[in-house]
Image (cartoon, helix red, strand yellow):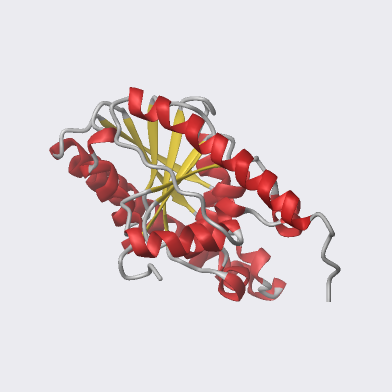
Amino acid sequence: IPAVPVDADQMEDEAVAELTRVLQEALPPLEAAGLTAEAELLRGRPSAAIVDDARIWQPDLIVLGSRGHGPVETAVLGSVSAAVVDHATCPVLVARSDHASRVILAEDGSPAGMAARDVVATWPAFAPLPVLVVGVVDVAAPWRSGIAPTMFAAAMDVYTEMLANARTTHREIVAATEAYLRAAGRTADGELREGDPSDQLRHAATDPAGDLLVVGSRGYVGVSRLVMGSVAHSVLTHAHCSVLVVKSSHDAH
């Protein structure tokens, strides 16, 4: 049983007083921007408390800051933003700057990707921002998958055909998303990239202070993410710009 410090009550009172002050200082800037704001001090583990409170309030969006933890720090110290993204059912914005001047939308044709597309197309906040739709062809050479050297020739033929099909499919997805956004009144351009999806999406964000990456998430957590990987989680962990993660209604949990 962990020892309880003799001054635990005093420490709690000081923490409550400090956090109450922080909350009260946060209200005036929000109200000055024309928003209706209320303050609430939660208790418990931050990520769990935020997600539990969100289940009651049913918000359209959760906004969090980020201390910029990398993959090692996130694994060792934990990350409130990553944990909230994992478990929240609504979109989560992890803000790393105080404004957005361009939206970079990751689109792969999946339900989560289309959910992210719909957020960009329908939320008024995105109306004045130019949108770059990015599709990424995941180029994985066949010899990286354990194919025996004697099968290289046949494997390369299949790989070349799969790559050509993937390029065509992703190009069509990007073009369709561009048209969808323009029909919704957005200014949209498209770009097709090749390589690791999370790396390419991060490279597409060239202005950390002004770019906003919008990605869909299939909702993989825990062991599922370790086995299947998660582009959204990788982007969230490594990107230097703000990231908005959107889950499809089918995958949200």
Q: What residue sits 31% from the left and 63% below the top?
A: 111
Quarter of the view holding residue 69: top right
Q: What residue sits 30% from the left and 66% below the top?
A: 249
Position of residue 48 relative to residue 136, above or below, is: below
Q: Which one is in front, 18 or 7? A: 7
- Residue 25 appears in the picture as rendered: yes
Q: Which one is in front, 86 or 60? A: 60
Position of residue 11 relative to residue 35, above or below, is: below
Q: Hey, which residue is sitting farthest left in the picture? A: 183
Q: Quadrant of the C terminus?
A: bottom left
Q: Which one is in front, 187 or 31? A: 31
Q: What residue sits 47% from the left and 27% below the top?
A: 98
Q: What residue sits 61% from the left and 75% below the top?
A: 223
Q: Which one is in front, 121 or 253? A: 253
Q: Is residue 215 left or right of residue 222?
A: left
Q: Quadrant of the N terminus?
A: bottom right
Count of number-bearing discs: 0
